[in-house]
Image (tube, rainbow, N blue to C red):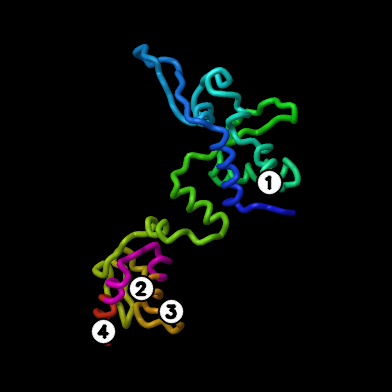
Amino acid sequence: MTTYTDLELWAIISAVYYDKNEFITVEAGRTKHGLRRQIGGLQAEVLHTESIDPVEKVGHPAEVFVTPRDVFDLTVYGDLGTVRRRLDDLVAEGLLDFHGDVVSHSEGDRRLYLPAELDRKQLVESLHELDGRPVPSVLQEERLTHVVPSDFTHKDGGVFTYDKDSNIEVDVSKPDDQRSIRKYVEQQLHEEGLTADIGNFYYKLRDHAGLIE
């Protein structure tokens, strides 16, 4: 049976969503001072977040939200039930929102979805992790705590202890395998949620430990 990764499925859903939606501005009642209140956004976003007459002011929900039928028509899934389950998987993973409306249609009731509000970095990180792909190094760096050589105290040999957490140690000795010292130290830091200006970092610690020849 043909299947799609979360990343592939997300790409299809996004294409459908942005094809069905336009940016609109609509009136949504009045403020407490009696002024007309206007809101703007993509049609599905407006319907999902505001209490307004959908058909008159925005469009029919089935025309702006992503439905299982939309995805089914663009994939080789064998049945709508499988598509619904995959969309619900993405809801559970925080990538999609379920609008909650079920609209009558000649082909049966349809569930309505739209992309969850995530910034692009959260989205890319989530999709890579769900598909078992390495998270891009730029995003990894943003999640790590930056450290400098003075944050560490020499313990013994090439081993240094992190001053803020004595359970964290970094060994700047030459590794037994084929890895470079630079890569070896960098991997140790990343495993502990840390990052550094790695060239300067490991050189200064090695110099302090008397390992520079």
60 within the magenta span: no
- In this rendering, which labeled residue sits more in front, label 3 or label 1? 1
Tell me whether circle 2 and circle 1 mark residues in contact (CB < 8 Å). no
Residue at 37%, 68% (x, y): give it.
168
Instruction: Write down the residue under mark 1.
Output: 75
Instruction: Write down the residue under mark 4.
Output: 210
Figure disc tally: 4
In space, the residues marked 3 and 1 are separated at their CA atoms by 43 Å
Which tag, 3 or 1, sits closer to the chain's start?
A: 1
Which tag, 1 or 4, sits closer to the chain's start?
A: 1
Residue at 27%, 88% (x, y): give it.
213
- In this rendering, which labeled residue sits more in front, label 1 or label 4? 1
The residue range painted magenta reads 187-203
User: What's the residue type where badge 4 is placed?
Assistant: Gly
User: What's the residue type where badge 3 is placed?
Assistant: Arg
In the structure shown, which secondary structural element does the residue marked by tag 3 occupy?
A: loop
Which tag, 2 or 1, sits closer to the chain's start?
A: 1
Is residue 190 placed above or below 184 in the rendered structure? above
Which tag, 4 or 3, sits closer to the chain's start?
A: 3
Quadrant in which residue 164 is drawn: bottom left
Within 10 angstroms of label 3, few (less than 14), some, or many (20 or more) residues? few
Instruction: Write down the residue under mark 3.
Output: 179
Tell me whether circle 2 and circle 3 mark residues in contact (CB < 8 Å). no
Instruction: Please identify the residue farthest to the top as the structure is shown.
Output: 34
- In this rendering, which labeled residue sits more in front, label 2 or label 3? 3
191 within the magenta span: yes
Residue 60 x/y as whole percent = 60, 24
Instruction: Write down the residue under mark 2.
Output: 170
Residue 97 x/y as whole percent = 55, 37
User: What's the residue type where badge 2 is placed?
Assistant: Val
